[in-house]
Amino acid sequence: MAGPRPVVCSGPSGVGKSTLLKKLMKEYEGVFGFSISHTTRKPRPGEQNGIDYHYVTRDVMQAGIDNGDFIESAEFSGNLYGTSKAAVQEVQSKNLICLLDIDMQGVKNIKKTDLNPMFISIQPPSMEILEKRLRGRKTESEESLQKRLQTAKIEMEFSKEPGAFDVIIINDNLDDAYAKLKDALKEKQTQMQHQSPLPPMRAAGC
């Protein structure tokens, strides 16, 4: 796909990926664009179609997967999640750096494509703190929460594999994690300038 090199952020549910990416897009408006994923799950309170996710039926999404319209897809708790080629292309067509928020299976699938993104892992300081954060959201049943914690353990082990991620950031403090995320992106951007026409990381209004 033509355009600036994308950035994949991955990590356990509840680790703070969405918050970090929203801060990044707000500060660097006109530099980053978010790839909106598709899902077959029902919207949670406050979520909006086309902003948080593209909410579709299983038949529609499965047809797209079978047709090769998705870069990656996975199933969790009976619901499909995935990133469509069109969602990434829409961001890249605006010469924006595409941000993708995906799980471990999505990372593995994308590594098999020619997308060639930068892979960043956002992790909690400990499983105990992650569990506290998930319980604090009060959006999960006990069964769903335990599934997410088990998945998180697997994801944390995967992140230890050599070459799995370019950067690993521990989100112990949101401001510190955000500063590390910006530093990592700026460093990688400098390294990639001679290979890909990246828009400069300047804060909005600068």
Image: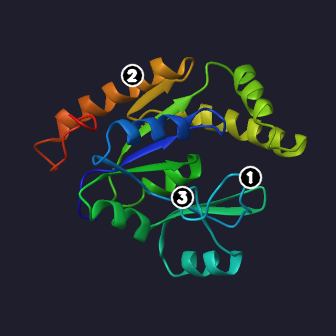
Residue 205 horizontal/vertical position (percent): 24, 37
Query: Disc 3 marks which residue?
Result: 51
Residue 9 versus residue 177 in the image, above or below: below
Badge 2 element: helix
Quadrant placement of the C terminus: top left
Foreground label between 1 and 2: 1
Residue type of the residue flagged with mark 1: Pro
- Sequence-wise, the earlier of marks 1 and 3 is 1
Q: Is residue 198 left or right of residue 175?
A: left
Q: Quadrant of residue 27?
A: top left
Residue 141 x/y as whole percent: 87, 44
| Circle 2 residue | 179
Q: Amino acid at mark 2?
A: Ala
Count of labels in the image:
3
Disc 1 versus disc 2: distance between alpha carbons? Answer: 30 Å
Location of residue 2 with respect to 32 vertically, above or below: below
